[in-house]
Amino acid sequence: MLWPRYDPPYDSPIEDLFAYHLDKYLPPDAKLDRQVEVATQCGTYRIDFVCVSGGRTIGFECDGQGYHNETRDVWRDALIMETRRVNAIYRITGRAIFHQINRALYLISRCERNLFSERGRTNLRILGEADMVAVKRFEDASFLDYRCYPERLAHFFDDQDLIEQASLKLTLRLTKSTDRRFYDREESEWSRKAQFARRHRGKSLNEIMQMYPY
């Protein structure tokens, strides 16, 4: 049985656009659910999308401007990751979804190769690398970096410094929370937050955030 993937209507335009594009690059047997509830020790939270494919369960958050508090999101993701319901959570801004969705998915494909179909990876690589200056992938950090410059303007840049200056204006950064970072590093920021929350079971997230000493 093949599960429906792009299945509008969605709660917001950015979620609709994200689901539409993600669906194009997934294998036929991938499953994509929306608004997936995850019970944690500080309450139940919803993940915008959860995709099961290639032996991985990946959460995606579509972060619209003004709707997210970065500090709270870190705690929320830590609590969700501790449940091990998902292997990773990727947060993509609304701006990136509207203007750089293929580049954003290309970055994710660099870390989650088995999530996408072979044809999907090929297409994302072609789209993502067309004007790439550099991609930085960090297994032990919380973000992915991508710098690019318009290829059609390349002939204006006669040295690397000018290319670097131009590319910095087009940086795309995605926030990620992944088991490859968290489960094997007991001293990570994520694990400290998760352990602190465990020691204060029964408290709300707001209370724990206020009590957290770091």
Image: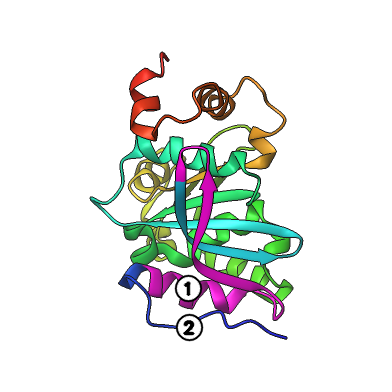
**Residue at (41% x, 63% y) in the render:** 100
| Alpha carbons under labels 2 and 1: distance apart | 8 Å
Q: Position of residue 75 (x, y in %)?
A: 45, 35
Depth check, front residue: 113 or 29: 29
Residues rendered magenta in the picture: 15-43
Depth check, front residue: 160 or 173: 173
Pointers 2 and 1 in contact (CB under 8 A)?
A: yes
**Residue at (64% x, 81% y) in the render:** 3
Q: Amino acid at mark 1?
A: Ala
**Residue at (34% x, 71% y) in the render:** 11
**The N terminus appears in which quarter of the rendering?**
bottom right
Left or right of residue 140, residue 213 in this image: left
Q: Amino acid at mark 2?
A: Asp
Mark 2 secondary-structure assignment = loop
Can you see residue 123?
no
**The C terminus appears in which quarter of the rendering?**
top left
Q: Which quadrant of the figure has residue 8?
A: bottom left
Q: Position of residue 45 (x, y in %)?
A: 45, 51
Q: Which residue is mark 1?
A: 19
Which mark is drawn over residue 7?
2
Q: Position of residue 26 (x, y in %)?
A: 64, 74
